Image (cartoon, helix red, strand yellow):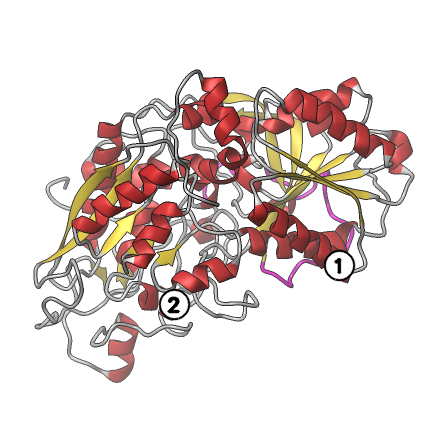
Amino acid sequence: MEPSTDRPDGGRSRQLRRYGPLVAIVVIAAVVGAVVLLTSGGDNKKQTVAGGEGNAPTGAISFSQAKKKGLDVEFSKWCDKSTGRIAMPYFFRPECYANVKDNGGATAQGVTKDTIKVVVYLGEEHDPIIDFITAAIKNNDTTEQVKETYLGYDAIFGSLYQTYGRKVQIEFVQGTGTIVDEVAARADAQRAIAKKPFIVWGGPAGTSAWADELAANKVICLSCTGGAFNDWWEQRDPYAISVIPSGEQVALILSEFVEKQLAGRKAVFAGDRAFQARDRKFGAVYAESGAESARLAGLFKDTLAAKGVQLAEQIPYTIDPARLQEQGAAMIGRLKAAGVTTVFFTGDPIAPRTFTEEATRQEYFPEWVINGSILTDVAAFGRTYDQRQWAHAFGITAGAARVRDENGGQIWKLHEWYHGKPPAAKDTYLVLWFQPAVFYAALQTFRDGLFAGRPTQHAITQVSVSWGRHGIWPKVDYNGVDDFTLLWWDPQAEGPDEIRKPGKGLYQYVDGGKRYLLGQFPRAAPKMFDRAGAVALYPDIPAAERPPDYPPPSPRR
């Protein structure tokens, strides 16, 4: 895509029409995606820090290495010597690393003997695109609250993790354009580059221009918007790292699910009884945002075809609020005329409301299959869809089974544990914490530090993450989350959604949220809409995944 040459003007409708196709594909994951991807709680005793396709920092000695070799080294006071891990109530708490006498001094740009400079991107206070997309969740956090929350979590990880005598210095860069303004993104990136940081956290969620500019200037960016395909990340290695699975990875794992559990079987979960007696006939609907989305749609179609599964229809749409109704009417008409019993939806969390309402108007009641794309697997949005339709929705998600906690989850409580108060950014703290968390977990060489670690423990209420090459994906992995689970929509289930709002309608997680890597889905009829073993909300964190309880650090004690 060429850089944009204009800025938003006029009314919201004109802005959204111009930026439309990109909006939902990339913005939501950065706004609230971590709500379901990286909620925390459990003991990660199996995590190790060797292997992968990277090198651990020279001179770094882990607790297990020191114990195995009988080394006489010193660890920080925050090391729990009984487990060899940092003493904090945190599922992903890492192994302890020994102190060093000489940290090497100025080892990279932005790194001195005493400090590490980090630049953090802040979006516009009132971006009309984000405001439109997130209207359903009522995000009221201010820029100052976001800053305070970043600094709060940085203080937690910076004081408890091994930093080899260095202190992180955070500087902020305020965005000057909307999330899809490429011209502003490149200009803002140059402002970040001018600060000469070691690493940048975040960026505008609607364009890869920010990450492109940073990579071209050899500055690392964590959680920047990137491409859907592995080759985009390879071309920018080692300067771009993500946490959320790539579009290519999702297409591969969804194809496996379809082949093993859906293809060649009756459409028993459809709302139309006539469909329930027919073999499944598949169609796909996807949000179109240019050449890359078309390429991704082609990958999904070709991957299915290689497994003997054909798509009767594959229909793109654009995220234009003024035209969703028009597009939905034509789309549903085509799917219905083709006799499609099972619709794959890949797109934003707003469009399904219009599309499902239109399907009901046309008396078309298929199965709806989701892949967790951009918050379609979030109850806060699922409640807004036509429930006669969404009662037949199911699929896969990279999110983890949820734990009932109306007063905030483990990451909220981690902030309270350390600071004695909740995070200031109450609506977006789950988007903010994982950037300092991932950074401190691989502090020294970052890319190699991440790639050197093995996948984290497999759990139910937690995702497993890894970077590098571990035999999980066919290519080198730059995208963090590896495993997926199955879920289905239950319009009768009651409880809090992801933003702690009570109500009716929740996703049920099959087999209690059991998670699968690529190649691990069983070849069997899916257990959708079967309450036996399904869980919508765990009443508490399962004992095996509950982190130890430690006294808070001074001066809290």
Residue at figure coordinates x 76%, y 21% from the top left: 360
Q: What range of the chain is rendered magenta?
A: 517-541
Q: Tell which tag, 1 or 2, sits nearer the viewer.
A: 2
User: Does residue 383 sit above or below 537 in this rendering?
Assistant: above
The secondary structure type at the circle numbered 2 is helix
| Quarter occupied by the C terminus | top left
Q: Earlier in the sequence, mark 1 or mark 2?
A: 2
Q: Which residue is mark 1?
A: 523
Place of residue 488 in the rendered image (x, y in percent of width and height, measured from the top left): 66, 38
Task: Determine if the magenta segment contains residue 519.
Answer: yes
User: Does residue 81 sit above or below 414 in this rendering?
Assistant: below
Task: Determine if the magenta segment contains residue 184.
Answer: no
Residue at figure coordinates x 80%, y 21% from the top left: 362
Q: Residues within 10 Å of mark 1 (few under 14, many from 20)?
A: few
Disc 1 from disc 2: Cα separation? 31 Å
Instruction: Give the label on residue 110, or none.
Output: none
Place of residue 365 in the rendered image (x, y in percent of width and height, measured from the top left): 80, 28
Residue 80 figure quarter = bottom left
Instruction: Give the label on residue 451, or none.
Output: 2
Of residues 127 and 18, which is closer to you in this image? 18
The answer to whether 494 appears left or right of 132 in the picture is right
Of residues 80 and 225, which is closer to you in this image? 225
The secondary structure type at the circle numbered 1 is loop
Q: Is residue 537 visible?
A: no
Dominant secondary-structure state across the stretch colored magenta: loop
Place of residue 379 in the rendered image (x, y in percent of width and height, measured from the top left): 55, 30
Question: Which residue sits furthest top?
Answer: 11
- Residue type, label 1: Arg
